[in-house]
Amino acid sequence: MAEEKKREGKHAINQEKETTNEMKSEEQAELKKQNETLKIQLEETEDRLKRIAAEFDNYKKRSSKEKEELYQSILGDVVSNFLPVIDNLEKAVESKTEDEGYKQGIELVLKQFQDVLVANGVKEIEAIGKTFDPELHEAVSLVTDENLREKEVKEEYRKGYMIGNKVIRHSMVVVAN
């Protein structure tokens, strides 16, 4: 009988161990499921974070580009309002006068205007001797001249200006042939 009790005790202990092992296996399986779920959630969160970071980076680039374009546009508008003044100063420099001091004063004012334009990235469009380009030049007349190539600009009535790649004012030109 003592042996039977020992066997029953061992059997009970084995059953407890099996039950405990089954519980541990179930807990481990549950923990594995939770672990996999958390890994998936982490991957989704990392993916969302990467997308948001990329969207923010694109927003910063787009915003910076829009600011630069707006600045260039406003600068172009302001400069275009001063171009007739510069045209008149150039005409004043070309006109004949007896007063050299007056002429030098006009030349200095014109030079200051030109320096301000250059400092702000404004360039004159080259025209005379260049091939006519409708994106840069505005043809006001055509002439026949055997000494010039076809579509070569012979004269410039009014200077053109640009900022970067944007034309502020087209050059008014006479085109040959």
Image: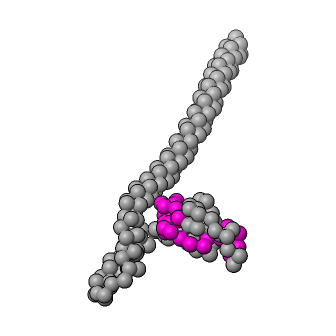
Q: Quick one: 84 or 45, which is closer to the camera?
A: 84
- Majority secondary structure of magenta residues: strand
Residue toward you, 31 or 101: 101
| x and y percentages locating residue 11 in the rendered image | 69, 17
Task: Tell me what residue is drawn at x 56 percent, y 72 percent.
Answer: 155
Point out residue 175 in the picture as x, y percentages from the top left corner.
Answer: 62, 67
Q: Hey, which residue is sitting farthest front in the picture?
A: 144
Residue 63 relative to residue 37: left or right: left
Q: Quadrant of residue 152?
A: bottom right
> Is 95 placed left or right of 12 in the picture?
left
Instruction: Answer above or below: position of 97 versus 77.
Output: below
Residue 43 placement: quadrant: top right
Residue 88 picture location, percent across and down: 37, 70
Residue name at image x 41 percent, y 80 percent = 94
Q: Residue at x 40, y 65 (%)?
A: 83
Q: Is residue 66 left or right of residue 36?
A: left
Which region is colored magenta? Answer: 148-172
Residue 51's spot in the image, x, y percent? Answer: 56, 42
Residue 53 seen anywhere in this rendered image of the structure: no
Q: Is residue 119 magenta?
A: no
Above or below for 13 versus 34: above
Residue occupying image coordinates x 47% and y 51%: 66
Q: Is residue 167 visible?
A: yes
Asked if residue 18 is positioned above or below residue 92 in the image, the reply reads above
